[in-house]
Structure formats: structure tokens, C-alpha cells
């Protein structure tokens, strides 16, 4: 019999807070539904008090997710806890996660309080959260650098006040595995009521040890791991979900531990998060990197062909990588696309086959061969299009060349109106952007970053442009994909404009609520 370790995913909270621009409600919901399908136990959906957008995301996820507990974060402050309770009350199952720092440096320099005052705040916060739910998690921020006597006192008091999970974060990624494992072991030896709560760990990766520290902690008795997809998060990131889940699965016999993660969903979830967050995965990343299952040396290739386990400790299929590639061209029929989407793990209801097939044919005409990542990108961008339809590009023409002034003309749909504008710029993308700003009349959007990547290989690869823009003091992220760089850039900008519209709508509703309209 193995012992079950709960997987607490914080991609949408700790992961998201490290992105250069925040995600929209729809994007967060898309990720939450993928996490639910992946089989995580708890989804930390956000920090409701931090902004109206975050409140709305947590509430939407709480309403839609049925097979995981939805959690919201709060400082040990009553107003934060109330915001969590309000956002989460629509959920089938929810958890309030409240935290306060416990290390000397945080207690003294940041909170400027005594240890006793901080302990009282923690106890009051847990008690307040228990008014909303009996599933309350308490975290001792910077536990990895906290005096062990104080940490034991804090854990005991939080459990006594009603915390059902107590989380021990290595907030700054400072500890090493033997040391972190020993902290957990000491808590089990010294805290008298420790059997009344689940002990959780939350490790950051500043020294590249987040996964190793989490494994050491579960070996010492912790039964919840907090982690993120692709390890995204503050600075060097958080413990990577896919790595820790595959360690527990691959070494189950040795560790005697298991999780509820459906490992075949890992690759797809990783790609979705990478795409939506615009955070590429390094090619040699364990489990989900492009090279994680590639064998280059002749000796290794020979060995693999004779017996897969000569050089592979787990199969690519076990994490959802299907190596069987059919050549998809404009001659491929709808049933081939449907079959391929099924192999990639998409259900019929995840996409519209007619729309996808039309987009596929157009792309196949331009590119010749269409690959899996193209299909997934088409689905992804179709979903974005359906969700954000206020601005739409109807026509684009751009001119550039040596000795000529770059110019562009765009025609756009804006709600029920249409408009056309032409502009010049220092290149065709700049000219097209100027034309869009002119036709939409939206000059409050300030572009602070423009990045161009290629999706796929060779000169016919798709261009992916990501744009980060500032609008009313907030940052928005937009991604555009096309065979043409100017069109990809324009799509990215329109994506940003649509996101700003959604944010305005959310702010407006919040203001109306405050004004009691
Ligand atoms: O790293 C950390 O300490 C955190 C807490 C809020 C759990 O993210
Ligand atoms: Zn953290």
C-alpha cells in the first residue's frame, strides 16, 4: 500500500504573479480546467483581495471546477480572508489559505512585530477563516529560515486554532534536502497535535533544489506538495509539478508514495501553460523539454531500438507524448485531423472541428506540412478569438522595402462598427500598429515589449509575436500567430486591446457594485 501525497497546484497564484503581465479570467479558467483534468487535488486560483480581476478569476474557477478543491490566498488580514470567502463560496469544495512570515528577518524587518504578536495574528486569521470553511491552510512564510523552536510553536498554535493543513515554505529556496527533510522530521517529533493536520511543503528553486527538497520532505512525512506546471514562479520558480509527480510515480516502489496525477495529461498541460503564459520550456527540461526523450548518441539509439528501458526510465507515452507522427497536408481529410486531435488528448467538445479544419486547410496551403504544434496553436487561437471578439482584424496590407517608407492599411471591426486607417512607421509592424491605434482611437495602450519567436522549424515556420503593453497602470500580454510576421504582430496587439476591454468591463462592474448600482 502506498501513502497518498496531495498535489496542490499554485500555477495560477505563485506562478502567475511572476509573469510580466497578468492573465485574463478566461486564460486562467482554461488553465484551471486543464489542471482539473490532470488530476491535481487543490488548485490555488489566485489572491482575491489583490485586484478585481483576480477576485473574478478565483470566483469563476470556483464555479466551474468540480473535481478539485479550489483555494484562494490571503494574508493574515481579515479583509483578505473575507475576500477569499466571498470569491470561493460558489465552489463545490474550497479552501482558504492564509499566511504570515515567521523568520526573524521577516518578523523584525518586514512586519516590525514581536514573535508573540505574529503568532496572535496567525491564530486570529485561522479562526476567522474557519468561519467560512473547515478546510483552512496556514503557511509560515520563510519557514526554511525560521527558528525551529518558534516554528514548532507556530505550527502547534495554527493547528490548535483550526488549520487542517500547515504549509512549510522554503520561500527563498535556501535550504538543502537533508536540512529541509530534518525540519519536517523535527516538526513530526516535537509538535504534539501534528497528527491533526496535513503537513505541506512549498519550495522555491533559487538553488535548483525545489524538487529535491520537496521529495526529502515527503520522505520525512509531509503529505502535500505545492508546485507549479513547468516550475514557473517567483525568481527561479517553484517546485515543478511534472518532475515531482514523475519522481513519485517512477520511484513508487522505493518511496512508497503516490499521487492522483494522470501522468498522460502532463505534456499537454505543460504546453498549454507555456503557450498561455508565453513562457517557453527549455529543451533539456526534465519530463517536458523537447529533448527529454530524444536520444542522440549512436550507442543510445542502438540500445533503445533493442530494448526501450536500456536508456529510458519512463516512456514518453506515460507523460502523454505521442511520437507517432502522421504527415498532415492539405490532402488530409477531416477524419485525419479529428483522429490526430484525439491522439493529442483533445476531446470533441474541446474544439470546433469545422473551424479547425478550415484553419488547417489555409495553413496547409501556406506551409505544405502541418505539425502537431500547429494544430494546437490553431485550437488555442480559435479559443482566444471566440472569447475576445470586440476587436477583429478584417484586412491588413503592409508595404516595406529598401528605399521606401514603410506603410500599412488596416480594416477593423470594433463591436458593431467597422473602420479603416492607413499609417506610416519605422517598419511594417510599426506602421500597422500606428494604423490600429488610429482606427481604434485607443492611444492609452503603451507597448513596452515586443518579442518574435518561430513556432516550428525552417523558413516556413509560423511566426509567434508576443507583446506586453501597459494600460491604466497594468500590464497586458498578447500573443499572435501567423505565417506572416506583420500579421502575427497585429494579432498580438489586437489580443492586448481585447484584454484591456475585458479588464475595463470587470473594473466597471466592481465600481457599480461598490456604488450599489
Ligand atoms: O513562497 C511562499 O512562502 C509563498 C507563501 C504565500 C505560501 O508563496
Ligand atoms: Zn511561493
Image (cartoon, grey):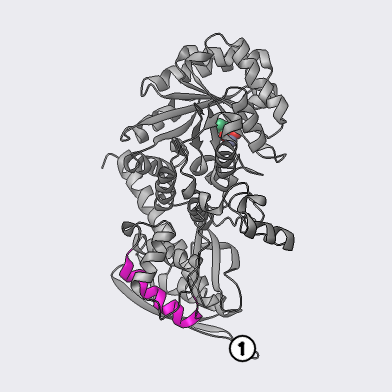
Given residues 111 and 460, the one toward you in this image is: 460
Corner quadrant of residue 56? top left
Q: Residue furthest top?
A: 192
Given residues 244 and 381, the one toward you in this image is: 244
Instruction: Give the magenta-colored segment's residue range.
Output: 352-369
Residue 135 seen in the current view: yes
Residue at 48% across, 30% down: 74
Which corner quadrant holds the C terminus? top left
Q: Is residue 395 above or below residue 264?
A: below
Image region (quadrant) for ligand 2: top right
Residue 32 x %, y %: 42, 45
Q: Which residue in the structure is indicated by mark 1?
A: 401
Residue 55 x %, y %: 40, 40
Q: Is residue 89 above or below residue 472?
A: above
Tag 1's secondary structure? loop
Q: Is 163 displayed left or right of 336 in the figure?
A: right
Residue 293 x %, y %: 62, 56
Does 362 appear in magenta? yes
Amino acid at each position: 500500500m502506498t501513502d497518498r501525497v496531495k498535489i496542490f497546484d499554485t500555477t495560477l497564484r505563485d506562478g502567475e504573479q511572476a509573469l510580466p503581465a497578468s492573465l485574463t479570467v478566461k486564460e486562467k479558467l482554461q488553465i484551471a480546467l486543464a489542471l482539473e483534468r490532470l488530476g491535481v487535488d487543490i488548485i490555488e486560483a489566485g489572491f482575491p483581495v489583490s485586484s478585481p480581476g483576480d477576485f473574478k478569476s478565483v470566483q469563476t474557477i470556483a464555479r466551474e471546477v468540480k473535481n478539485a478543491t479550489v483555494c484562494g490566498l490571503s494574508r493574515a488580514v481579515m479583509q483578505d480572508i473575507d475576500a477569499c470567502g466571498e470569491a470561493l463560496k460558489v465552489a463545490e469544495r474550497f479552501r482558504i489559505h492564509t499566511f504570515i512570515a515567521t523568520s526573524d528577518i521577516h518578523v523584525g524587518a518586514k512586519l516590525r512585530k514581536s514573535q508573540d504578536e505574529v503568532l496572535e495574528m496567525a491564530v486570529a486569521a485561522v479562526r476567522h477563516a474557519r468561519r467560512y470553511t473547515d478546510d483552512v491552510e496556514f503557511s509560515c512564510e520563510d519557514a526554511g529560515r525560521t527558528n525551529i523552536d518558534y516554528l514548532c510553536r507556530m505550527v502547534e498554535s495554527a493547528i490548535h486554532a483550526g488549520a487542517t493543513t500547515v504549509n512549510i515554505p522554503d520561500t527563498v529556496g535556501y535550504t538543502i534536502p537533508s536540512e529541509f527533510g530534518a525540519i519536517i522530521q523535527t516538526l513530526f517529533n516535537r509538535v504534539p497535535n501534528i497528527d491533526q493536520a496535513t503537513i505541506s511543503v512549498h519550495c522555491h528553486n533559487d538553488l535548483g533544489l525545489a524538487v529535491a527538497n520537496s521529495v526529502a520532505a515527503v520522505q520525512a512525512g509531509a503529505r502535500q506538495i505545492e508546485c507549479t506546471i513547468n516550475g514557473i514562479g517567483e525568481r527561479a520558480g517553484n517546485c515543478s509539478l511534472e518532475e515531482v509527480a514523475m519522481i513519485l510515480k517512477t520511484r513508487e516502489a522505493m518511496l512508497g508514495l503516490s499521487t492522483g496525477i494522470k501522468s498522460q495529461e502532463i505534456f499537454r498541460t505543460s504546453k498549454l501553460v507555456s503557450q498561455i503564459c508565453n513562457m517557453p520550456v527549455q529543451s533539456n527540461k526534465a519530463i517536458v523539454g523537447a529533448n527529454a526523450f530524444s536520444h542522440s548518441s549512436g550507442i543510445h539509439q542502438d540500445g533503445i531500438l533493442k530494448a526501450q528501458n536500456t536508456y529510458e526510465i519512463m516512456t514518453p507515452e506515460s507523460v502523454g507524448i505521442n511520437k507517432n507522427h502522421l504527415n498532415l497536408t492539405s490532402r488530409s481529410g477531416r477524419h485525419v485531423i479529428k483522429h490526430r486531435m484525439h491522439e493529442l488528448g483533445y476531446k470533441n467538445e474541446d474544439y470546433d472541428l469545422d473551424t479547425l479544419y478550415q484553419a488547417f486547410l489555409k495553413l496547409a496551403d501556406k506551409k505544405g506540412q502541418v505539425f502537431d504544434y500547429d494544430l494546437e496553436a490553431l485550437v488555442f487561437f480559435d479559443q482566444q478569438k471566440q472569447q475576445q471578439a470586440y476587436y477583429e482584424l478584417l484586412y491588413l496590407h503592409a508595404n516595406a522595402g529598401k528605399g521606401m517608407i514603410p506603410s500599412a492599411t488596416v480594416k477593423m471591426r470594433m463591436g458593431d462598427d467597422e473602420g479603416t486607417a492607413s499609417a506610416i512607421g519605422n517598419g511594417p509592424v510599426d506602421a500597422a500598429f500606428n494604423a490600429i491605434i488610429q482606427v481604434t482611437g485607443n492611444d492609452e495602450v503603451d507597448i513596452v515589449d515586443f518579442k518574435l519567436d518561430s513556432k516550428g522549424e525552417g523558413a516556413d515556420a509560423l511566426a509567434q509575436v508576443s507583446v506586453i503593453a501597459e494600460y491604466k497602470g497594468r500590464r497586458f500580454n498578447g500573443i499572435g500567430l501567423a505565417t506572416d510576421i506583420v500579421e502575427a504582430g497585429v494579432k498580438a496587439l489586437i489580443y492586448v486591446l481585447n484584454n484591456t476591454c475585458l479588464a475595463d468591463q470587470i473594473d466597471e462592474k466592481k465600481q457599480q457594485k461598490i456604488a450599489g448600482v
